[in-house]
Amino acid sequence: MRRNLNSKKLIFIILLTALFTVASYFFDQLVIRTEDNLRNSKINLENSTVKISNMANVRNEIYSLELLAVSSAIRLGKLRNYWFKNILLLKHPELSNYYEEEFKSSFNTRFKVESVIKYRILDFYKDIVWTHNTIRKRMKNIYDWQENLFPKYFEKIDGIIYSNYPEVDYKKIFVEIEPLLNFKNFWQNYAEIIYDDDKYYEAFENFDLLNWSDLHKYSYALINSFEFYENLLNNDVKYLETSEEKEIKVRNSLIEEISLTNTKKNYYILISIICQIFSLFTLLVLFRTLIIKKK
């Protein structure tokens, strides 16, 4: 009996059973590991999809803001000289009477022409500044939440992260045109026209031609500065388009990887099942051999 149990055939069947059992266990472990990799790849795919969606949304917002800057430059640029020319004509000693009648007939107004023009100049100036402020506010709403997309616009100071994207600086524009102004204290006297009704009506009552000239020069410079936003926003749109294309390639690569990993997992499952079947088969053969030898 001992010789039978040590027979080469019996040992071969035992080793074959063990081999298929170990192989089945090995491929089961590969399935588990592949499922872990698959889970991680799916998480990365979801993150990539969210990132692409965020890029597209931010890009559309910035593009919309760029259109606002462009359309504002066109809209305000058409009138940047118009109202100042009107007040020059009104102040002309030989043309004032004729011009006043022409103005009233053109604009169908019963109000004093000089008053209408002064209000239009002041409101035009306010419109320019409000448009700038609208762009600045919308930029803040976009960029303040996009540290991941625009790390160049953020800096850490004393452990706290602050946004630091470029903006049009009103004071800097004033300093640049200051040599051309008639009154060097323009900033202190006229900047509050936008927010202070008393300053607004004080300007309306007391401005002379030199004051209106200074206000026109500053308004002109502010309109030209819309180009700053156009260039900045256009560059950021292009940057996001490039980043989005790269991320789409990453997402496509992840999709291919997930598909390949799924295929591998299915093969591992199939091989594991086959090994289990062969293991059971060889185990049955082993039992049958033992029974036969015992008889």
Image (cartoon, grey):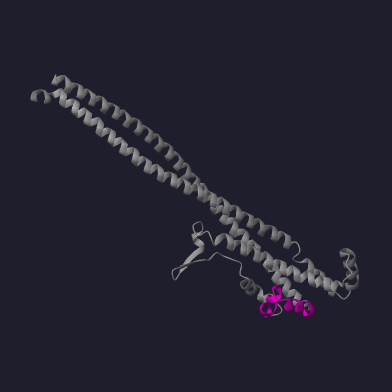
Q: Quadrant of the C terminus?
A: top left
Residue 179, percent across and down? 66, 76
Drawn side of residue 5 relative to residue 220, left or right: left
Which of the pair 229/109 is nearer the observer?
109
The region drawn magenta spans 184-207
Residue 234 visible? The answer is: yes
Q: Which quadrant of the figure has residue 71?
A: bottom right
Q: Determine if the magenta segment contains residue 190.
A: yes
Residue 228 visible? The answer is: no
151, above or below 177, in the image? above
Drawn side of residue 85 relative to residue 148, left or right: right
Q: Determine if the magenta segment contains residue 53.
A: no
218, above or below 76, in the image? below
Residue 145, percent across and down? 53, 60
Give the residue displayed 17% in from the left and 21% down from the top: 291
140, above or below 290, in the image? below
Which of the pair 17/67 is nearer the observer?
17
Give the residue displayed 64% in from the left and 62% down from the top: 135
Which of the pair 75/263 is nearer the observer?
263
Q: Which quadrant of the figure has residue 217?
A: bottom right
Drawn side of residue 114 relative to residue 35, left or right: right
Give the residue displayed 16% in from the left and 19% down from the top: 292
Q: Quadrant of the N terminus?
A: top left
Q: How many marks?
A: 0
Residue 227, percent across and down? 64, 61
Q: Main secondary structure of the magenta part?
A: helix
Q: Residue furthest front?
A: 295
Q: Which quadrant of the figure has residue 128?
A: bottom right
Give the residue displayed 70% in from the left and 73% down from the top: 194
